[in-house]
Image (tube, helix red, strand yellow):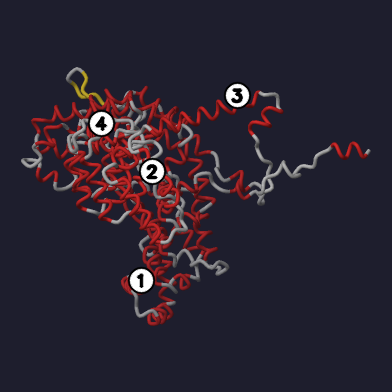
Amino acid sequence: MPANTSSKKKFGSEGDKSAGGKRKFDGGNNASAAGGGGDSEQSASNKKRALKHERQSHRRHADAVVVSKEIWNKLRLKTNTKKETQDMTDELMELLRGKFAQVAMQHDASRVVQAVLQYGTPQQRLEVVKELANSDVAGSGKKGSSTNSLAELCKVQYAHFAVLKIIKYCYKDKECVKIAVKSLKGQVSKLAVHAVGARVIELLFSTFPPKSTALLKLELYGPQFALFASGDLSNVTSNHPTLEKVIEQQPKKRDAALEYVLGILNKGMEKNLWGFAYFQQLFSEYVTSASPNDVRAITSSVVDHSIHMLSTRAGTRVVAECATYGTPKDRKRIMKSLKGYTRSSLLHRDAYLALLRLIDVTDDTVAINKSVLAELQVNPDAKGNDDEDGAGSNLSPILDLATSDTGSKLFLLLLSSSDETRRRYFDPMELEVLRTGATIQEGGEDIPTSKKNADTRRTELLQYVRSLLIELCAKHPDELLRSTPGSRVLREVVASFPSQELVDAIVGACKESMNGESDELSIFEDRTGQLALKHLLLDEAGHKSDDEEEEEEEDADRASFAAALQSTFSGKLVQIASSNRGCFVLVSLLKVESVKKDVLKELKKNESKIKKAAGKNEMSAGYEALLKAIKEG
């Protein structure tokens, strides 16, 4: 037993441990003990490392790069004081002055130049920008021989990061902006379709002041516009130049400009620049300026990438125009590209518009239902709420859409039966995209891009979501009444599918809100809720007055919201009149002829109470309007 214990060597005994407690690595001895193979491996590793250092030593400014990298490693620490940061930046300036352009092109040293631009003073940044803009990047040996040296750096994988830092940290310095713009002049159309340079153009147009980049943007429409911008285009360049404005100023060059832009777009599509905002903007300008036939010609190249174009309003306009003038096959390819993204697109600030246009012009309503509308049947929150008393199953799957500014536009589009209703809910830009009567030229004739009647398409699609909409309004009247987008949807659903079920649900929500069990204001006092009730009552009053002679029998069977409201709050109307906004609701209720007599009778009985409440509220507009209506009634 003693022999065994003595033969075992403790881990950490002297000779196996270094001063820090770790085992020492004796390359030669240990390798020999292992069989002699380690010696060759170690030597090969050393040789490889030595070759790397030797290669780096032959690079330009190798010694300065090594020292500057050590300084940079300290400079990037967040614990540095302001003075330490400035001192290290000054040291880097001394080391790299006259060498910035060559150092910026090295993969492991470009970060040093970026650090100087990030941490340097305005004067130091200006010095670096001037040097990068005037250095011999092309390698001719003459300083300043390359007039577009900054543009050349934009094309280099590592150097372009330094240019990005110039844009990011120097955009407030007018001198730096002027130098950068001058150096890039004449090169924008090339950089815009360069795999690396495109990143610089993207940040340039989104960061620099639009007025300073106006001349650069004109290069995207053709070299002739940038060269002679001081003439007819002076008004265009002083603001935000667009292809439409350029063509308007020089209509004779329309074909040349469209052809040049199309060339840039084709190169950009080949290099997959779909996600760049400037590329989407240029594309949008093209499809809104080109003829319908030209738009159709390029549509087949765009449709498969539709989902990538929906990140901006400009990209959305491109997809919308492609849906407008594309063939039925193109529209189906757009549906395929957007499949699985219906809900997220409808909730996006821009993407919703392309989806609305696709739905608006596609004749194949069955395909729209299967590819687009079917996704709305599933409640996205149902899984997360199943364990909480089944709350998820009680929520309507379209509640989040109906109460969204953008998502509600889908239902309003389908529920709007007239141009007047559309103008009520859609802004001018949306109406321009959702215009009717789009045509293309075939054989010298204007042929509609959609063959089916617009009302027929709308009616067919509305049938697919009818049950969803009725269920939504029956389950969630309170949420809809208190939401501006939701109240609009509720109003149109009641107008399109009037039923006693919906009327009872709305009146029930109003009654429940008056119980005082919730901290929320009653619907009659809620800013959005009282407006929603007013519109519902005024719609009913207008409907009955318009159709009084023609549809008297039909109106008798029609569910009346005014009648249900009057019946439920009979004897309690004075409670509604206890608030200024509630008074406006009662004024609207008095405009419905079928209940006017009973409502007026009850209000006259309580006129003294209403006047008393009006005195406490300093005779606000609601009380004034109600008392006037009672007097005139």
Q: Is residue 530 above or below residue 91?
A: below
Number of the front mark, 1 or 2 = 2
Question: How far is disc 1 from disc 2 in space, using C-alphas?
Answer: 66 Å
Question: How far is disc 3 from disc 2 in space, using C-alphas?
Answer: 36 Å
**Where, by quadrant of the figure, is residue 497 drawn?**
top left
Sequence-first tag of 3 and 2: 3
Labels 4 & 1 near each other (Cβ < 8 A): no
Number of the front mark, 3 or 2 = 3
Q: Residues within 10 Å of mark 4 (few under 14, many from 20)?
A: some
Give percent across and percent down for residue 584: 37, 67
Number of the front mark, 3 or 4 = 3
**Residue 40, labelled with which disc?**
3
Q: Is residue 538 left or right of residue 29?
A: left
* Element carrying mark 1: helix
Sequence-first tag of 4 and 2: 2
Q: Amino acid at mark 1?
A: Gly
Give percent across and percent down for residue 351: 38, 40
Question: How far is disc 3 from disc 4 in space, using C-alphas?
Answer: 77 Å
Q: Residues within 10 Å of mark 3 (few under 14, many from 20)?
A: few
Work out whether residue 613 or residue 529 is closer to the camera in this orientation and state it.
529
Question: How far is disc 4 from disc 2 in space, using C-alphas?
Answer: 53 Å
Labels 1 & 3 near each other (Cβ < 8 A): no
Labels 3 & 2 near each other (Cβ < 8 A): no
Q: Which residue is mark 1?
A: 622
Q: Is residue 462 above or below residue 443?
A: below
* Element carrying mark 4: loop
* Element carrying mark 2: helix
Work out whether residue 85 or residue 204 is closer to the camera in this orientation and state it.
85
Q: Residue at x 30, y 40 (%)?
A: 202
**Residue 111, labelled with which disc?**
2
Q: Amino acid at mark 2?
A: Arg
Q: Which residue is mark 4?
A: 438
